[in-house]
Amino acid sequence: MLAFMSPHLAVGASPAADPNSPCPIARALEIVGERWSLLILREAFMGQRRFNDFERRLGIARNILSARLKHLVERGVLSREPSREDARQIEYRLTPMGKALFPVLVSMAQWGTQWAPCEETALELRNADTGAPLTALRAFDADGSELTPRNLRLHWREPG
Amino acid sequence: MLAFMSPHLAVGASPAADPNSPCPIARALEIVGERWSLLILREAFMGQRRFNDFERRLGIARNILSARLKHLVERGVLSREPSREDARQIEYRLTPMGKALFPVLVSMAQWGTQWAPCEETALELRNADTGAPLTALRAFDADGSELTPRNLRLHWREPG
């Protein structure tokens, strides 16, 4: 109980990715922190739904893809259901929990584009209606003020 | 060359985290995709700078912490320099590249809080000046329109 009440002890006693961590980042990592998971989700956001398409587009080993999809389904990020067009086909679809990951993917894509530039950044994020490119991901507080690294404070809530 | 020009082939031929991937998400994962890395960065955002403090607060094995810090320094996310107060102490500080990761941490924390709730979410993100809690991370395009999973399109730019 003491370990649970003290964030430091609790985090300290836990592996990096812990579903019971008091840190929501650690809990998120337990669900989607494996590297392939975010790339599988990228493909799901791009409209892919089938095992063979994930496999072909990612070049991922079938046993690893199978394990990752199983974990994402168990955790509620993807649903697994027969295709509406062909009931013999299984489809993996983003659930609302999965769709809610889009800021995670967007923030990773933006940071990678800016800070790990490549001769050709082939992934583009755009407004589907107008084609305008995504330019900013901005954080706001309950008063509507914008939060930046300058005025954002991360802290542990004291127990009690 | 064909492999480089074709995002599918290039991604397919690569491991999940590839510094030369055409996908900026894969490039970001190569730098910060290891699970401990984001928790080390969380501590850096909370003001921690010293090896022993990272070790104590994270409960991470010294050899793993050492390897992760080395990687983050090599990739430019953290700087490694003598303390200004005590030159015998080494400090790890967020570089501008590291500070730019705050939307990644914020989006993970928000998603974990909402979708992997815990009896006690001990990590809080607030406006340092007013104490108002962070409530939203919003994406905008070049025209100032907000992007959501409904109107955000991820796609591969065709070569040429």
Image (cartoon, coloured by chain):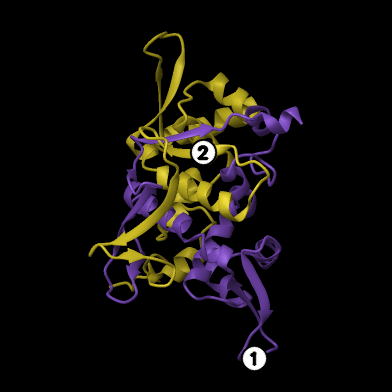
Chain colours: A yellow, B purple
Snapshot quadrant of residue B119: bottom left
Residue A140 left/right relative to B27: left
Q: Name the residue under label 1.
A: B86
Instruction: Confirm or deny contact between disc 2 and disc 1 (CB under 8 A).
Output: no
Please provide percent x and percent y for residue B144: 34, 49
Query: Which chain does the residue under circle 2 lie in?
Result: A
Query: Which chain does the residue under circle 1 lie in?
Result: B
Please provide percent x and percent y for residue B141: 39, 46
Question: Disc 1 on helix, strand or loop?
Answer: loop
Determine the CA span between mark 2 and mark 1. 46 Å
Tell me the kind of residue under disc 1.
Answer: Asp
Can residue A80 be seen by looking at this rendering?
A: yes
Residue most toward the left?
A143
Residue A124 circle label: 2
Please provide percent x and percent y for residue B126: 33, 68
Looking at the image, which residue is at 32% across and 46% down? B146
Packing grade of label 1 (10 A; few <14, some 14-19, many >=20) is: few
Please check whether the numbered discs 2 and 1 fall on a single chain.
no
Question: Disc 2 on helix, strand or loop?
Answer: strand
- Quadrant in the picture for the C terminus of chain A: bottom left
Tell me the kind of residue under disc 2.
Answer: Glu
Please provide percent x and percent y for residue B1: 77, 31
